[in-house]
């Protein structure tokens, strides 16, 4: 029997729960159709859900229908509970996206579509409420194709020529099958849906059971069961508690089997499974064993968290949707907040996005919340579970911080009989990339177990920025060096050193404050579009006209959350109820009023005793504090960045002093190196495929002297600028006095050479020691100059250029760096040493002068050749 896990998603009020009821009824799981408005829906099991008529928590039902066993997951539709919905996506085999046929594609619908694409989940679309007036199938299909994906196909017209033609346009394999047989095989369609190349669409009314049975048959016909490995693996997607307070861990098995009394473990815990439950609505049955593909709830585990992976599964779930508002939780008078904190932590286990924190400075409990509806639900939960009536303060925007350039952070912790030093490289990432952690530290410096411990400490905490104390994001933090003491180092020492290294690095960097932005869609009457665009500009947002339909215009754009809050009320007011605003969280971007926010928050990084920026060192048996700006003067390990700079500076100095000779590797030696590496594993037959030797390629015309029958490609000459300067005696001598003068002299030589050769000349200079420097490309007369970005050498830039463009251009590299020569030849490109480049430039100049002189001789009319002999003799007579 086919076994699937299917989730139902929708914008609020699209009829998602009603469709779930219809599927359960048609499968025979329930005998009577429940209704949301009657407060008797099978999957709305909580009193709050029935009272409000919305789904708050994801629930499941196991049913058998049309030869399938389906675990149906009903998810919240309200945007305030989107985090609960997103957590279920990691365990789905297929998704059903429900769309209200009367309203069409909403803003939150598009957010759901992007999430489904992110998690690569195949989607079936059910357009609901088609029994209402004003719904048009053709108009809705056009909207689906424009707003969601052009590969949305109406499957109610299957077995028609139009249907086959539309499918063929979605995927290359489907096109090939259609051209071969003019028929679309079911298995080809199943594969295309699985690969998200086709999105089947069905129409109906869940309330009246119209089109639902056909929809179920379509799911049975066009889905396939996943295959699972034999080794145990599971994904945890939800934590809850039953009526007796037992902690439940909901998981999907993605490999092997799970039995009662099995021992499960993660990075820092190991616990025994005491019970396995299979839930359907409120009821459950206990089983002794479950197999891969099953959704179950497990008791006995106290350390699990949503998003964790167990067994063979190693990926960790990182949610895309997150709250952007922080609220103070106000307790009744006489209640100790420190006693309330552990209770609230239970709610945080179930919804990690709440991020319950105790602010020591403000002496208050804070929580991050999606919106007003979630506040009401939390108040009810806290009262029912903990018999405490709480209120919430005014919401504040959740800001974040990142950095503008790469820095090295150092943390040292050495009170008496303790020791740890940590060096971290902090690098800025793309907006929205979050935090990434890596290990690039030699085990000669620090044992692997200590390195893993440092990475755990990096991941376990929300690190604060130094501008406003907001969480940091969008950067890569890499462990590059560290030191432990065999006798005195304990695990907690590295926790202290790691935290301090992060903060010390942030203090050095140029920090950037980020704020959340809404992506919005605003529909207003045409005569009011001017007012709307003016409002958006005042809110520091941007917008453009998406479409015009009749008397209404749709604007799309983005604006800061803080300025768009409550704008919905204004839209309703000035359009007299005709306007509609749909907002979705776009992500974080640089703050539009950084200084104002900093002044309002008033955060002082030096007074945050919970997050120190300095380090602790030891002398004469006692520890002492060192401020962040002086830590590097006391550290025990050489700076990672400084070490790389000193190596290059030392090499430059040796060139200047004439201590380093030009390291030009012989062509035979290059061939030996390449043959021992590139061709080493190709076997005896590779001799027939082997490229020409370096000597053969060199002495035959290179890319600079193209053969008549060779494919014409544009010629590029890349030059390692400083390498050539210190290899040419006259330029090296000039560089000792004036480096700028030496650079200009080299560029003049190359400008003349380019004028003769007519190739593209690129001179690459190192700028890797300039903090925050980006790649800079300058046109100097007829050649190009490149200054590399921070932490990128000229060699690295040239290697990257060669790798990316060797197939498109004839590339020659001028360098005397031995390792670089091997790499360039390995890529199949031509080489000049510094000496040979000089000879090539001088030779080209001589050839040009010789050709010029020969031309002048041919074209010149000499006086002695044209005047008569008599006049010639008179001219030659002396006066």
Image: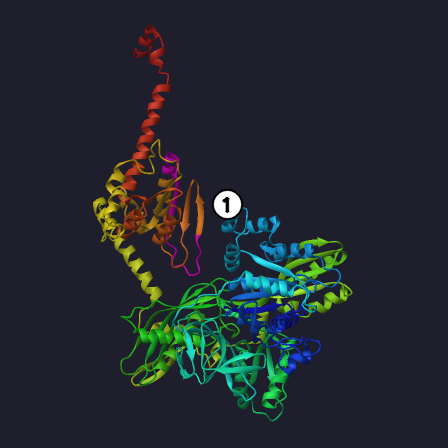
Task: Report if residue 542 lies within the magenta region.
Answer: no
Front-most of residues 686 and 817: 686
Assign the C terminus to one quadrant of the image.
top left
Write down the region rendered in magenta: 751-775
Task: Report if residue 755 lies within the magenta region.
Answer: yes
- The answer to which image quadrant residue 47 occupies is bottom right
Position in image of residue 208 (x %, y %): 70, 68
Identify the residue at horizontal 73%, vertical 57% (top origin): 529
Front-most of residues 291 and 579: 291
Q: Is residue 847 above or below residue 871?
A: below
How many marks on residues? 1
Front-most of residues 680 and 43: 43
Front-most of residues 233 and 790: 233
517 vs 755, left or right, is right
Identify the residue at horizontal 27%, vertical 40% (top origin): 697
Report the coloring of the rendering: rainbow
Query: Can residue 290 be seen from the camera position used here?
Result: yes
Position in image of residue 385 (x %, y %): 59, 88
- Extreme right residue here? 576
Query: Can residue 590 be seen from the camera position used here?
Result: no
Which residue corresponds to mark 1?
180
Position in image of residue 199 (x %, y %): 57, 58
Position in image of residue 521 (x %, y %): 66, 61
- The answer to which image quadrant residue 730 occupies is top left
Q: Secondary structure at mark 1?
A: helix
Q: Is residue 84 above or below residue 163?
A: below
- Extreme bottom residue here? 334
Q: Residues within 10 Å of mark 1 (few under 14, many from 20)?
A: few
- Extreme top residue here? 870
């Amino acid at each position: 029997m086919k076994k699937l896990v299917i989730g139902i998603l929708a914008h609020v009020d699209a009829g998602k729960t009603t469709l779930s009821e219809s599927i359960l009824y048609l499968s025979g799981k329930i005998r009577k159709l429940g209704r949301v408005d009657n407060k008797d829906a099978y999957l709305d099991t909580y009193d709050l859900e029935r009272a409000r008529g919305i789904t708050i928590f994801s629930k499941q039902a196991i049913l058998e229908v049309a030869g399938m066993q389906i675990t149906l997951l009903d998810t919240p539709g309200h945007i305030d509970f989107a985090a609960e919905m997103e957590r279920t996506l990691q365990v789905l085999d297929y998704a059903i996206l429900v769309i209200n046929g009367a309203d069409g594609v909403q803003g939150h619908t598009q957010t759901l579509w992007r999430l489904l694409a992110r998690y690569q989940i195949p989607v079936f679309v059910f357009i609901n409420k088609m029994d209402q007036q004003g719904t048009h199938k053709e108009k809705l299909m056009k909207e689906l194709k424009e707003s969601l994906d052009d590969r949305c196909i109406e499957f109610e017209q299957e077995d028609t020529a139009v249907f086959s033609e539309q499918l063929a346009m979605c995927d290359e394999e489907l096109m090939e099958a259609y051209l071969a047989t003019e028929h679309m095989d079911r298995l080809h369609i199943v594969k295309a849906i699985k690969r998200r190349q086709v999105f089947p669409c069905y129409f109906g009314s869940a309330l009246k059971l119209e089109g639902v049975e056909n929809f179920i048959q379509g799911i049975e016909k066009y889905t396939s069961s996943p295959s699972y490995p034999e080794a145990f693996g599971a994904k945890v997607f939800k934590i809850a508690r039953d009526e007796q307070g037992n902690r439940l861990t909901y998981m999907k098995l993605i490999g092997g089997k799970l039995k009662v009394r099995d021992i499960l473990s993660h990075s820092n815990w190991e616990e025994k499974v005491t019970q396995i439950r299979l839930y359907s609505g409120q009821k459950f049955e206990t089983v002794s064993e479950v197999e891969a593909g099953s959704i179950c709830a497990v008791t006995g585990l106290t350390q699990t968290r949503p998003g964790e992976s167990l067994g063979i599964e190693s990926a960790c779930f990182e949610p895309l949707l997150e709250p952007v508002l922080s609220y103070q939780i106000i307790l009744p008078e006489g209640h100790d907040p420190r006693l309330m904190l552990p209770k609230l932590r239970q709610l945080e286990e179930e919804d990690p996005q709440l991020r319950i924190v105790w602010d020591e400075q403000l002496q208050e409990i804070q929580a991050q919340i999606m919106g007003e509806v979630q506040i009401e639900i939390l108040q009810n939960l806290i009262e029912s579970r903990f018999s405490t009536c709480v209120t919430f303060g005014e919401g504040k925007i959740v800001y974040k911080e990142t950095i503008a350039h790469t820095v090295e952070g150092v943390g040292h912790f050495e009170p008496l009989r303790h020791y740890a030093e940590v060096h971290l490289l902090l690098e800025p990432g793309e907006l929205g990339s979050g935090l990434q952690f890596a290990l690039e530290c030699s085990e000669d410096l620090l044992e692997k177990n200590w390195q893993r411990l440092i990475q755990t400490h990096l991941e376990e905490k929300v690190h604060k920025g130094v501008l406003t104390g907001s969480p940091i994001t969008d950067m890569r933090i890499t462990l590059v060096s560290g030191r432990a003491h065999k006798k005195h180092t304990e695990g907690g020492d590295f926790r202290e050193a790691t935290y301090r290294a992060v903060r010390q690095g942030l203090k050095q960097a140029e920090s950037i404050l980020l704020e959340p932005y809404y992506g919005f869609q605003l529909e207003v009457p045409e005569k009011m579009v001017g007012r709307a665009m003016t409002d958006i500009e005042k809110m520091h947002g941007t917008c453009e006209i998406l479409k015009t339909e009749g008397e209404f215009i749709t604007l799309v754009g983005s604006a800061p959350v803080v300025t768009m809050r409550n704008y919905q009320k204004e839209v309703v007011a000035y359009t007299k109820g005709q306007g509609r605003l749909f907002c979705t969280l776009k992500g974080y971007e640089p703050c539009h009023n950084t200084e104002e926010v900093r002044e309002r928050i008033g955060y002082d990084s030096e007074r945050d005793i919970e997050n120190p920026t300095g380090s602790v060192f030891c002398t004469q048996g006692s520890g002492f504090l060192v401020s962040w700006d002086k830590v590097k003067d006391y550290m025990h390990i050489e700076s990672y960045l400084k070490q790389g700079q000193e190596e290059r500076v030392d090499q430059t100095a040796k060139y200047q002093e004439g201590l380093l000779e030009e390291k030009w590797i012989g062509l035979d030696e290059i061939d030996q190196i390449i043959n021992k590496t590139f061709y080493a594993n190709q076997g005896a037959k590779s001799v027939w495929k082997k490229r020409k030797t370096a000597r053969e390629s060199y002495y035959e015309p290179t890319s600079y002297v193209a053969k008549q029958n060779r494919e014409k490609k544009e010629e590029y000459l890349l030059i390692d600028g400083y390498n050539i300067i210190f290899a040419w005696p006259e330029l090296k001598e000039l560089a000792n006095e004036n480096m700028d003068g030496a650079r200009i002299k080299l560029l003049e030589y190359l400008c003349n050479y380019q004028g003769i050769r007519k190739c593209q000349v690129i001179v690459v200079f190192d700028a890797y020691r300039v903090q925050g420097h980006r790649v800079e490309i300058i046109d100097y007369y007829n050649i190009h100059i490149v200054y590399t970005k921070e932490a990128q050498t000229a060699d690295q830039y040239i290697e990257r250029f060669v790798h990316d463009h060797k197939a498109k251009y004839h590339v020659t590299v001028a360098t005397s760096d031995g390792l670089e020569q091997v790499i360039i030849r390995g890529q199949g490109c031509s080489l000049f040493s510094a000496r040979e480049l000089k000879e090539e430039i001088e030779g080209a100049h001589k050839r040009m002068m010789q050709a010029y002189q020969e031309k002048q001789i041919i074209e010149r009319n000499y006086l002695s050749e044209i005047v008569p002999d008599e006049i010639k003799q008179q001219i030659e007579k002396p006066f």
